[in-house]
Amino acid sequence: MTASTIISMTGFARAEGSHGPYAWTWEARSVNARALDVRIRVAGGFDRLEPAARAAAAERFKRGNINVALVLQAADRPLRMRINRELLDDVLRVAAELEGAGAAKPRLDALLAVRGIIEPVEEEDEAEREAAEAAMLTVLGQALDGLAAARAEEGGRLLPVLTGHLDRIEELVAAARASAGAQPQALAERLRTQVAELLQASAGLPEERLAQEAALIAAKADIREELDRLSAHVAQAREMLAAAGAVGRRLDFLCQEFNREANTLCSKAADVDLTRIGLDLKATVEQLREQIQNIE
């Protein structure tokens, strides 16, 4: 994995293994989440594998909803026969009652033919079981490594999409800078008109108050500060995408800043062209945010 690869929170992997009479499959899948949420499901009788499986997943992943499942195939272990003495005692007690009522004494083969009196029992060696569990954890590591590779591969597919959105934002910022409504001459003309209207409507106001109102009008008419911040955000986003590690949370926060500047731009727009650019900018930022939700 190179330093320029971002990591998605979406992926799937599986790995199979066997040891002695045991055969199993680990399946690991993940989807996006605000934090790391690991859920482990193991086959019956293997609950003691769960803490180690949870720790292995937490070691590899920083964010995402991680689901890991152990599916165990039927073990081919030797069988021995066991008498269910509790059931046999119940049958003998009923037979004795019937015998007292005149029924014939039951034969041994008839007793043993009663379902459940003779049960097959799988023989299991504890050392063999422990060796199988160790092998299961090794295969689990393979499944989790496969999931990490799948998430990195998906992140590689996301990278050009995110870069394309940033390119589009840069294009819109450049268009906003070049628009007639953002030109100094247009700004100055608009400011003169608004100040003249203010003076006409506010006759008798103190000069200090008039100066404050004029300053507010000038600040609202000028979008250069918002455009500068948008350009800085684009540069910062590109740096994050080129960095190693989990950057999803930081990018998500940066998207909020993108959206704030886009909203301000729309509110300041005084002509149709600039308004259209602002709306396109908001739509592109939203598309960027949707994709960033999938990044670790």
Image (tube, grey):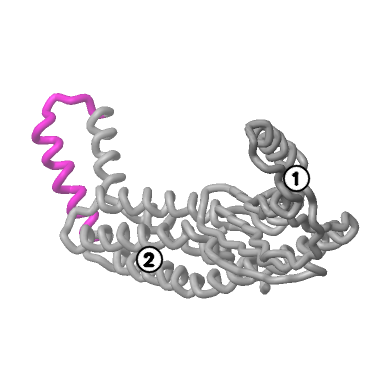
274 or 245, nearer to the observer? 245
Left or right of residue 223: residue 72: right
**Disc 1 marks which amino acid?**
Asn
**Disc 2 marks which amino acid?**
Ile
- The segment highlighted magenta reads 185-207
24 or 115, nearer to the observer? 115
Question: Which quadrant would the C terminus be assigned to in this image?
Answer: bottom right
Q: Is residue 11 above or below residue 213?
A: below
| Nearer to us: label 1 or label 2 | 1
Question: Is residue 163 something one can see in this rendering?
Answer: yes
| Of callouts 1 and 2, the N-terminal one | 1
Horizontal and vertical percent position of residue 17:
73, 71
How many residues crowd mark 1 within 10 Å: few (<14), some (14–19), many (20+)?
few
Q: Is residue 52 above or below residue 244?
A: above
- In this view, the residue farthest toward the front is 102
Task: Look at mark 2 in the image and give the residue it sits on.
Answer: 169
Are discs 1 and 2 less than 8 Å apart at CB? no
Task: Look at mark 1 in the image and give the residue it sits on.
Answer: 84
Q: Secondary structure at mark 1?
A: loop
Left or right of residue 126: residue 201: left
Horizontal and vertical percent position of residue 208:
28, 28
Horizontal and vertical percent position of residue 98:
64, 35
Main secondary structure found in the magenta portion: helix
Q: Residue at x 27, y 34 (%)?
A: 211
